[in-house]
Image (cartoon, rainbow, N blue to C red):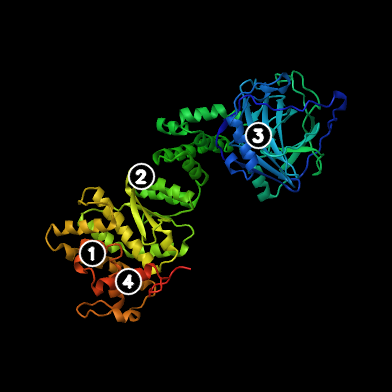
Amino acid sequence: MKRLCLCLIWPLVFLLLLNACSPGEAPSQEDDPKERGSTPLGISLEQMALQDLNDEPVRTAISRLSSMGGTTTTKNMGSDLYGFTVDTSMVKVITHDDVTSYTFPIKRGRNDGSFFENLVLQRNPSGNLQAFLVRYHLKDGIRALAEHGSFSFEGRRELFSLDLERLDVGLVEKNDTCYDVVELWCHFGGTDHPAGEMCILEAQLTGDDRLFYKESMVCLIGGSGSGIPGEPDLGNGEGGNGGGAGFEDPYIITAPTNVALYESQLKEFASGKLSQAERGYYNSDSNIKNIVDGYLIDNGVSNLAMFKAKNHLSLGYDLSLTPQQFVWYFQHRDSGEVEDLKQYLQDQSNSAKARAFGKESISAWMDNGEVDFEEEIIYLLEGYPCQKNIIQEALAANSPVTDLVRDIFNSNVKPTITIQAYNLNNILEGGNTHAQNGNPLHYFITMNTQRLDVSTDIDIASTAIHESVHALLFYFYQAGSFQSNNESYAQLVEDFTIHQASFGGDHHEYMQNFVGDIADSLYSWSINNNYVPNNFTEYDTNDSNNYDGLREYLGKLAWNGLTDTGTFELLYPEGTLERQNIIQLINSESLPYENSANPFGTPCD
């Protein structure tokens, strides 16, 4: 079960249907109620939070309730009756044929404990919506049960019709006078209790007859101004056990729900089980508190449930998860992704860097991303499966370059990376890299979707490699390991090689060697992807080295992103044939659709 928030409802203007059955017209109750041995055909029940409902008008109606202030009403509007709060965390969604109902627990400050109430919204086969307040008057109180985190009670039912027209939920069904109130119940653990999702799921697995329903013929009550009738006995409403699945029309289908009986245990959990930091996080947002409370209630607020909830809150606090992130994490707490996250945090001794990457990982999963904890890379490339595969393989082949840079600075630091895809509105730009605000160890590589859509696999691999180098140099530049004029890839590479040369050697030679290292990584990737040197013999023109034609070709492409550097200008002056050849080869792979292009690579489909 999911929990989200409590929505405060100030006194609302709900029209009560004033016609009620007279005492003489009230339907009689069954003296010897019949129980049904199995769930009626066509009935299902789910528990979820308001935000997960697949019914926009219902979400709108409940959301608007929380934003409406007090309204001056006439004497007969029953405004006091509706000064309640709705718990949007425990919505029971019941479907019977073409009817769907939504049951919310509600609270009011004036409740003396002799009753509890539910808000029931029901969408009928016509598509129209009805709204009711169901009040359960308790005979001998309410009893909490460990089984299924439920409760048991006996008592009379009372029904009020609510007006939803001014909540802008579309057409509202005209209400009848008397209703067959149908409640789903469960035999389990020796005590009957209102059915919940767990009971439904277990019944489906076991095939036993634990599910049944109760019916009460209840007539609507007229408002009295205060909305708390003194002796409302119209329709009686004593719960009887129903027979067949053919309910009396009109009917309301629901399953009673109540969370108030666990309030003292939840308070004890917060004050006695949580540390000050965990308690502060738990109480910091209703979304966090409600989803944890729902889990505890579902599990009878057992010691094991409290222990697990405490650990989840501790992780949320350590990772500084937003309420939305924590809700996602909690809903997926038993998933393989979350297990991988916990193992990663443990392997990294819960370091600040690991915690920051963990938070980024949850954000990525919320956006359908993929996380590689071993390489500490997040991929947000939904819709680009072919390109993502190329990038992953290229980065795996690039480890010699990253190891080289880290060795130069005598560091084992490897910043974490998110690789994402966005339109950079300039097809000549393959990608860019920037640091994340507030996290000096995490960098975002943005691949240009304009290029991903058209460029070849060789260009995508080349861009991925040089942007990963960009992120690494960016980190060492920000750490003060070397000086640079700006944060662009070209300038950082230029200034990095100048830094190397300051210890002896020629700067331009260092630059050529560094570009050669990038070419080696690209060569390793290309061999793994079935590129054959024999197809590049026309580029095998340098007999003074041991490079084949493929390596010579990729050595030219490795200048991609660096053609504006001073070193490139010096080595390949403007107007020279070799300079024109390098730029043309780069453009052929990045813009293969142009008439003059002659790429060796292959674009993704």
Query: Which tag, 3 or 1, sits closer to the chain's start?
Result: 3
In the rendered image of this protein, does residue 550 appear above or below residue 282? below
Q: Of the residues under marks 4 and 3, which one precedes in the sequence?
A: 3
Give the x, y percent position of residue 236.
80, 26
Residue 194's label in the rendered image is none
Q: Quadrant of residue 220?
A: top right
Disc 2 to disc 3, C-alpha distance:
48 Å
Q: Are marks 1 and 2 in contact (CB under 8 Å)?
A: no
Q: Residue type at mark 4: give it.
A: Gln
Q: Residues within 10 Å of mark 1 (few under 14, many from 20)?
A: many
Q: Residue at x 14, y 63 (%)?
A: 506
Nearer-N-terminus badge (4/2):
2
Q: Amino acid at mark 3?
A: Leu
Q: Which residue is mark 4?
A: 584
The circle on residue 350 is: 2
Q: Position of residue 176 (x, y in %)?
A: 80, 34
Pick the front one: 198 or 59: 59
Residue 167: give its label.
3
Query: Disc 2 vs disc 3: which is toward the camera?
Result: 3
Question: Could you say which disc has been placed on residue 514 in the image?
Answer: 1
Q: CA distance from mark 3 to mark 1?
A: 66 Å
